[in-house]
Image (cartoon, rainbow, N blue to C red):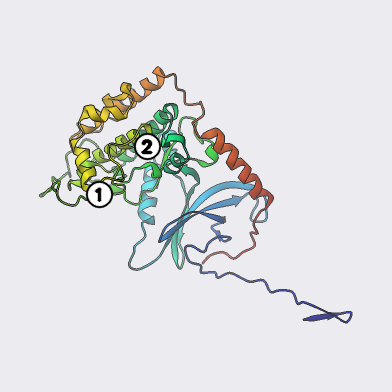
Amino acid sequence: MTQTNGKENPAPKEKQSKSVRPAFDELIGRHIKGWFIHDIIGKGTFGCIYKCTRNAGGRKSGEILEYAALKSECKTNKRPSSMNKEVSIINAVQKSNLQKKKHFFVKVFENGEKVKFTYIITTLFGPNLFDILIATPNKKIEERTWVRVIYNVLEGLRTLHRRKYIHLDLKPANIVIDYNAVRRQPDVVAHIIDFGLARKLDYSIGSTDGYVEPDVLRTELEEPIWVGSIYHCSPFIHRGYPPTYRDDLYSWLYIAMDLYKELPWNPADSPQEIVKKKFDNTESQLKKYLPPELGCIVGQVINLKPSDKPKYKEIGESLRQYMKLKNICWNEPCEWEPLLQQQLAEKDMKDKQNPKSNDVNDVE
């Protein structure tokens, strides 16, 4: 205690310093490579995703220059990090000669490792389609937004495949919109994320080199295998075929059906029942889950052989003709944009009015 004019005053509290070696889930209020880390926006058993910002004029400046997402993963000897693979894939697809193609994926700002975790700092996107659907009446997207979303995802897959990568985990939760629902590119409304299960093939699109037929296929009675979401996984993965470009097109088709209407299978079905329905549903039956004008897309996907080049061009042309028929323009608002822009703008205003202190230690 200190004493002034005969009165005792409490001694000033010592400023508590945080550990300079935090765990992957203890990064709020820290700095990494000039980025200030805010709230957790996603969390799993071994990793977290944070919202972070970088200020113009240094840390003390209140003017936010840029938003980003920081993904951290726990470093353990038993569980190797997938960060390096993800960075390699993202950097590969960002080498596209067309600027628009780069907007289908995140951009890597920084990546590295600390004492207890590895990290990657990338473009900050908005919510994923799964979360948007949960908050949407009837859990469906209206057709004027739907066709633009699936067109963008198809273009993104084509870009990925040109670099000999397949995604293998395409589902609504891995398709996101722009941060604050404000588009970076007028004709890009959806982006593909999460390359943790992606794989590089040894052969180009349409080539038979490197493809090997499996020695033994799983039967309908055996427990099926799958990669990513069983609901959107290619049926040939279930049977034990090695992954090919075709499998991403199957996932794309199932997403198109799911977002437009529904899937022929549901969570009440067992894994064996889901796989059986995937093989039993005929082309004419699957067409019922898409607009009548786009029924031709089903055959362009399910009639592909393992080594066939996916019909990106033909499918894309069908989608463009559908947009023309329905008078759908890229510059019209997507279903979710007006409301999300208003909600997120109000939240950002509150954040700026009540900024968090940036006076903290860097992370080692």
Label whose residue precedes the other's in the sequence (2 or 1): 2
Residue at position x 58%, y 42% in the image:
344
Position in image of residue 162 (x %, y %)? 31, 38
| Location of residue 105 by image quarter | top left
Reply above or below: 356 against 316.
Answer: below
Label for residue 156? 2
| Location of residue 6 by image quarter | bottom right
Q: Residue furthest left?
A: 215
Residue at position x 63%, y 59% in the image:
358
Q: Which residue corresponds to mark 1?
A: 226
Reply above or below: 164 against 322.
Answer: below
Task: Assign the N terminus to one quadrant of the image.
Answer: bottom right
Spatial CA distance of label 2 from label 1 is: 22 Å
Residue at position x 35%, y 53% in the image:
85
Q: Do callouts 2 and 1 mark residues in contact (Cβ within 8 Å)? A: no
Q: Which amino acid type is shown beneath numbered disc 1?
A: Trp
Q: Is residue 63 visible?
A: no
Q: Residue furthest front?
A: 268
Q: Which amino acid type is shown beneath numbered disc 2?
A: Gly
| 10 Å crowding of disc 1: few (<14), some (14-19), many (20+) | many
| 305 left or right of 98 in image | left
Residue at position x 61%, y 64% in the image:
360
Number of callouts in the render?
2
| 141 left or right of 245 in image | right
Q: The residue tagged with tag 1: helix, strand or loop?
A: loop
